Image (cartoon, grey):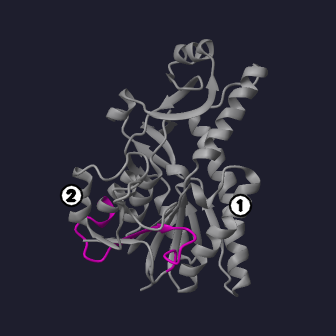
């Protein structure tokens, strides 16, 4: 059987503006093509922080200057970001594969992920998004039921980051993967939705992209999760003179380092937690964390930090 992997692309793989994204996706495509060229079945997921922030800011500004256009919910902004990132990414991967003589269809699946309406995160939103607002504008947002926080530049909106429960389109992703497609799915952590009877309602939230990547890899029963980020290896004592890069780490090592407070929230900690969840008790599953442009972004994993049971 072919090996199945999920590749999670971080911010560095996508850039922040449209021109940057078009260049960055070409580099990401080369990394993905290394795995595909080895005959592996590949599903790709990606971040969307700068992109969804840009969309949310633009749509909020449109509503502010043209009130006849209704405000755009966060879930719709997330869907927009999945579409336009997927568009650039699938074309870049297709071009890279064709240049190598590999003929495969690359498909983007607009992905929704269910969350629990009673998740504690909804009571304590922390994720900052969107444009800088005045105090008066922030008060208007609060009246709508949204949450804001004061920053050094002004007021910003904050949303919850609930835990993902299940991937709504997982059967479609599996079917495409089994048919030999390269699939792009769960971009930006997926669109968080609440199940209300037979309907799915978009939640005012974002899902941590690394957590969603781990769930995607688990539900696809993958052999490996590759997290491409801004550093070549996971480091202990990161940012200090005593920094120690790690070539390898067991799940028990990872748990101990978390207890020691080695990994920063919002950066490396979600990646390590996703690795622990994905590997679980499996003696087969592995996670590689490395930099996009390093030699580790390849099947043989000659650089980067490998995590296993």
> Is-magenta flag for residue 297?
yes
Horizontal placement of 173 versus 70: left or right? Answer: left
Residue drawn at the location 67% of the way across and 50% of the way down: 16
Q: Residue at x 58, y 63 (%)?
A: 184
Position of residue 247 relative to residue 151, above or below, is below
Residue at the front extreme?
A: 241
Q: Which mark is residue 256?
A: 2
Is residue 98 a member of the stretch shown in magenta? Answer: no
Alpha-carbon span between mark 1 and mark 2: 40 Å
The secondary element bearing badge 1 is classed as helix
Task: Point out the frontmost of discs 1 and 2.
Answer: 2
Q: Is residue 198 visible?
A: no
Left or right: where 27 falls relative to 185? right
Query: Looking at this view, is 249 or 99 the one in front?
Result: 249
Q: Position of residue 304 (x, y in %)?
A: 43, 72
Q: Quadrant of the N terminus?
A: bottom left
Q: Position of residue 84 (x, y in %)?
A: 69, 52
Quarter of the image with the C terminus is bottom left
* Element type at mark 2: helix
Asked whether, in this view, residue 118 is left or right of residue 256, the answer is: right
Query: Residue 121, position in %: x, y?
Result: 36, 34
- Answer whether residue 51 is visible to the viewer in this image: yes
Magenta residues span: 277-298
Point 45% across, 76% down: residue: 303
Mark seen at residue 88: 1
Report crowding for label 1: few under 14, some 14 to 19, many 20 or more residues within 10 A (C-alpha). some
Which of these two is toward me, 174 or 211? 211
Instruction: Give the mark nearest the N terminus, 1 or 2.
Output: 1
């Amino acid at each position: 059987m072919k090996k199945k992997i999920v590749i999670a692309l971080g911010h560095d793989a996508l850039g922040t503006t449209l021109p940057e994204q078009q260049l960055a996706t070409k580099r990401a495509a080369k990394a993905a093509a290394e795995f595909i060229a080895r005959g592996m079945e590949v599903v790709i997921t990606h971040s969307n922080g700068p992109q969804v922030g840009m969309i949310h800011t633009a749509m909020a500004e449109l509503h502010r200057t043209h009130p006849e256009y209704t405000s755009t919910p966060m879930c719709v902004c997330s869907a927009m970001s999945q579409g336009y990132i997927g568009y650039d990414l699938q074309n870049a991967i297709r071009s890279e594969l064709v240049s190598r003589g590999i003929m495969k269809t690359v498909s983007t699946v607009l992905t929704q992920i269910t969350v629990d309406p009673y998740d504690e995160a909804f009571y304590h939103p922390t994720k900052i998004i969107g444009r800088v607002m005045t105090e008066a504008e922030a008060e208007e947002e609060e009246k709508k039921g949204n949450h804001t926080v004061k920053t050094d530049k002004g007021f910003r909106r904050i949303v919850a980051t609930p835990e993902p429960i299940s991937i709504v389109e997982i059967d479609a992703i599996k079917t495409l993967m089994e048919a030999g497609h390269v699939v792009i799915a769960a971009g930006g952590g997926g669109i968080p939705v609440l199940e209300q009877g037979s309907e799915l309602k978009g939640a005012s939230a974002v899902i941590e992209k690394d957590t969603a990547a781990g769930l995607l890899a688990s539900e696809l029963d993958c052999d490996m999760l590759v997290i491409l980020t801004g550093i070549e290896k996971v480091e202990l004592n990161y940012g200090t003179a005593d920094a120690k890069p790690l070539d390898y780490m067991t799940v028990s090592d990872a748990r101990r380092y978390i207890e020691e407070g080695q990994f920063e929230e919002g950066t490396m900690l979600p990646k390590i937690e996703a690795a622990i969840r994905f590997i679980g008790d499996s003696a087969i599953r592995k996670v590689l964390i490395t930099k996009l442009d390093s030699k580790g972004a390849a099947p043989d994993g000659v650089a980067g930090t490998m995590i296993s049971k």
